[in-house]
Amino acid sequence: MTHTLHRRGNRESLSTDYVFTSMAARKFNMEGGAEQFNKFFRICAKHNPEFMGDLSRGNEEILGRENLMISSIDKSFGQAVYRDIDTVAAVLKELIDEGFDRSIVIAGLFDEVEKCCQKVGIGTPHTIEWSLGTWGDESLMAPKEDLEIMTMCGHAQIPGSLVRHLAQRVKEGKISAGDGSRKMARQCTCGVCNVGRGAELLTAIAEKM
């Protein structure tokens, strides 16, 4: 999915950030998909995701994780975020073993995701997409460290002003980095914001303020 392509950071940071996205194809296999997406969320939840959400309904901060697992609709977009590739492999294997039959996309470091696919018997990924980076005057963009958080919401719903506001509150001891990251993640309807990584990045910004 293109909205998870533009996450920024160094390899060490991005090696703790993997996103599952699943959706049906309109006029092909959308009808009857609700139970499949309930299955998707149940399996993902078993493996302690950082965050989950459904673009059609909202993220877990809005709906609650339990509700995500029982109220899917045919046009749901299942999304979940994990911090290590071994868990990604475990989730992928269970989805396959349990007969989940909608398309699955995993966003993350290409070489690690490919190893994951080989580990569960898929072999080479069917399709690979990547971002070509930023074209134009980058001086007009937010600072690099802010963008590392902002790009964890692919629909640009985490503004730089919110990142800076919450970092200042963390610096002043008025909020924990974890709570601040949850407040940012709430803005990401899809549920692709990595709250654990977000807390680390928010802490790093606060320490430099």
Image (tube, rainbow, N blue to C red):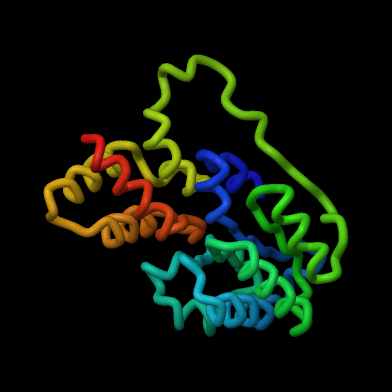
In the image, residue 100 above or below residue 152: below
User: x, y (%) of residue 188?
Assistant: 43, 54
Quadrant of the snapshot with the C terminus: top left
User: x, y (%) of residue 150?
Assistant: 42, 42
In the image, residue 129 above or below residue 116: above
User: x, y (%) of residue 96?
Assistant: 77, 77
The quarter holding residue 6 reads top right
Looking at this rendering, what residue extends furthest in the front direction?
A: 12
The quarter holding residue 5 reads top right
Q: Residue at x 61, y 64 (%)?
A: 77
Q: How many marks?
A: 0
Front residue (pair 127, 48):
48
Front residue (pair 129, 68):
129
- Left or right of 50? Residue 166 is left
Front residue (pair 157, 109):
109
User: x, y (%) of residue 119?
Assistant: 79, 67
In the image, residue 122 above or below residue 168: below
Q: Residue at x 36, y 52 (%)?
A: 200
In the image, residue 143 above or below residue 176: above
Q: Residue at x 59, y 57 (%)?
A: 18
- Left or right of 172? Residue 89 is right
Front residue (pair 102, 123):
123
- Left or right of 66? Residue 4 is right
The quarter holding residue 80 reads bottom right
Q: Residue at x 29, y 48 (%)?
A: 203
